[in-house]
């Protein structure tokens, strides 16, 4: 659809097949090593991460950290079961969805944790491309709500 010069509607910047990305940081009242250990405990994620109803580590790397996990998310718009592949660094880890699911075309994310004077600053980043027929503003809100819920829940654990 072509917009005329008088058309003041804001175009939707998220079209089908376009990923939505955002990140959010939180200060956690615990040292970096404790926060990283907590975040890397993917089996426990179902007990604190909003929308996550099941989580199970399927494979571990040579240092015992999760390298593949199965998760089930049950959020307002849909329920989805999927696996994620994890890559670890000294200050956190990242993940990616190896293949599309009934709800997600693509998902990539990360947690980074840095020292904040004896406390920690934890930053979660998330990129999501859903296969659901949702308007862009709903997709953006879903990512923002996930980030807000996860960072808030993390801070409450310490």
Image (cartoon, rainbow, N blue to C red):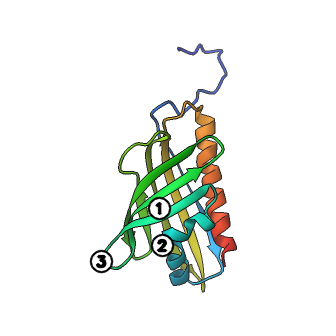
What's the mark number on residue 84?
none
Q: What is the residue that sits farthest to the left in this orientation?
A: 62
- Residue 105's quadrant in the figure? top left
State which mark lies toward you, 3 or 1: 3
Residue drawn 65% across the image and 15% down it: 6
Q: Nearer the viewer, residue 77 or 27?
A: 77
Identify the image quadrant of residue 121.
bottom right
Label 2 crowd bin: few (<14), some (14–19), many (20+), radius 10 Å: some
Q: Nearer the viewer, residue 75 or 148?
A: 75
Between discs 3 and 1, the one toward the N terminus: 3
Q: Which numbered marker is on residue 110?
A: 1
| Image coords of residue 41 (percent x, y) | 50, 73
Q: Which residue is mark 3?
A: 62
Q: Residue at x 55, y 60 (%)?
A: 54
Secondary element under disc 3, as helix, strand or loop, is: loop
Q: Measured from the top left, where is residue 111 in percent x and y?
A: 50, 66
**Above or below for 98 versus 114:** above
Could you tell me how far apart the alpha carbons at marks 2 and 1 are, in whole angstroms?
Answer: 11 Å
Q: Which residue is mark 2?
A: 40
- Tag 2 secondary structure: helix
Image vertical order of residue 137 relative to residue 32, above or below: above
């Amino acid at each position: 659809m072509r917009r005329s010069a008088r058309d003041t509607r804001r175009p939707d910047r998220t079209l089908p097949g376009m990923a939505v990305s955002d990140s959010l940081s939180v200060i956690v009242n615990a040292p970096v090593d404790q926060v990283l250990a907590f975040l890397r405990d993917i089996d426990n994620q179902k007990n604190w991460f909003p929308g996550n109803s099941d989580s199970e580590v399927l494979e571990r790397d040579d240092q015992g950290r999760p390298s593949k996990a199965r998760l089930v998310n049950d959020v307002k718009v849909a329920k989805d079961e999927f696996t994620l592949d994890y890559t670890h660094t000294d200050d956190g880890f990242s993940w990616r969805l190896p293949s599309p699911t009934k709800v997600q075309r693509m998902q990539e994310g990360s947690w980074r944790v840095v020292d904040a004077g004896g406390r920690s600053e934890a930053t979660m980043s998330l990129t999501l491309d859903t296969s659901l027929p949702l308007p862009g503003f709903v997709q953006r809100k879903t990512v923002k709500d996930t980030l807000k819920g996860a960072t808030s829940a993390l801070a409450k654990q310490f």
